[in-house]
Image (cartoon, rainbow, N blue to C red):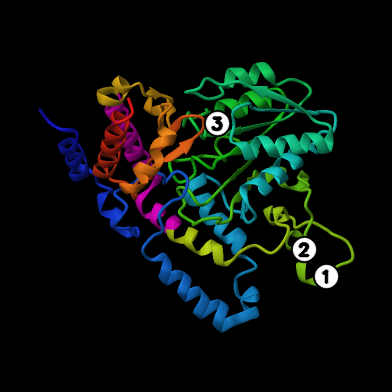
Amino acid sequence: MTTTGERAAALDREDPLMPFRSRFLAVPEVLAYLDGNSLGRPLDRTPDRMAGFVRDQWGARLIRGWDEGWMEAPVRVGDELGRIALGAAPGQVVVGDSTSVLLYKAVRAALALDRGRTEIVFAAADFPTDRFVLQGIAAETGAVLVPLPAPHDGGVTSEQVAAAAGPRTAVVVLSHIAYRSAAITDVRAVTAAAHEAGAMVVWDLSHSVGALPLALDAWRVDLAVGCTYKYLNGGPGSPAFLYARADLLPRLEQPIQGWMGADRPFEMGERYAPDAGVRRFLSGTPSIVAMQPVLDMLGLLDEVGLTAVRAKSEQLTRFVIERFDAELAALGVRLASPRDDRLRGSHVTLDHPAFESMLPALHRRGVIPDFRRPDGLRIGLSPLSTSFAEVDAGLDAVVEELRFRV
């Protein structure tokens, strides 16, 4: 009978993306890194890129760098991000600020398009920052929040949106992939349902960008935001991005007016006038330094292609579910992610009351999963840096530690 270790080894041998794993920095004491959906590993070339930027651009060019490419960097990097990972034509993506700040800007801009619409439809179990930002916007503007429920192992459906959105709905705000369950929401169908009601949609792509192909232009998405430190491997606190559909840009007013989003930043004018393009969503000075690691990962994704990345993501998560069925279910673990590959992102959530108490022991063994309260262990799988053997070893440790406790 084939062991799980033997099966994992065979899958690694057959994996066409296995050679790319050597492009990432590895830590010997980490046996299994299963949290790439929260913070991706750095690429091995990134230290040299960072050192070269400090030496050759910041150090050598000093303030002249702003006239030699830094001013254009937020949109130039945004265009690359749009081409490689978002399915977006040039001039619609800008990089800067955090996901929370850009979500605030996007929702406020959407809400301001029709003052007669005052409702915000959102997922009741969405990531905390999304809910907290919306609560703040509601307090500021008097908007009414309309929460949509979702099953523990699923996400919001287009049917729910169609039923909830009406003549008072200004904007629907949803995550493409649910942060806890990994359930994939149908962007095209939900966007169409919202548009049918005359509402805008703002998507949070944080758990999908870099993990599966996106087609924002083809899906007629209005606005979207997302982070770059998960599957785009930009590092802790790397800048987020905002997408705004080109035909909407002239009508969108962002609420945090700053000099970097003005049409002529260095004129130091008396009054604010927004840039004509997506740059209008900038406020203060963006972090040019923090964009450098993102460029490395975008180059790798361009080389590999997101179709291949998605194929391996499905295999990796399927392997986790196979291990769940074979061993973990009998130990009282519950599967809290969709079984259907088409409906599941690049992580699998497993629930058990003992998981939180197990984390220190797992870390001592070099196994680093993610945990989401009250009892969810997220097995985060970054396709280009995660091997099947690594996943197998990590799950072996989970099984062994769990058997001590049940």
| Circle 3/circle 2 CB separation < 8 Å | no
Q: Position of residue 230 (x, y in %)?
A: 47, 48
Residue at 34% over, 58% down: 24
- Quote the CA–CA distance across marks 1 and 3: 41 Å
First in sequence: mark 3 vs mark 2: 3
- Quote the CA–CA distance across marks 3 and 2: 33 Å
Indicate the amino acid at tag 2: Trp
Give the vertical position of 64 relative to 381 (above or below). Answer: below
Numbered range of the magenta stretch? 297-324
| Circle 1/circle 2 CB separation < 8 Å | yes
> Does the magenta-highlighted stretch encompass residue 311?
yes
Q: Quadrant of the N terminus?
A: top left
Choose between 389 and 96: the one closer to the eye: 389
Q: Is residue 71 left or right of residue 10?
A: right
Which residue position holds label 1?
268
Indicate the amino acid at tag 3: Val
Say which mark, if any, is on residue 259: 2
Mark 1 Cα within 10 Å, few/some/many (few <14, many 20+)? few
Indicate the amino acid at tag 1: Met
Which residue position holds label 3?
187
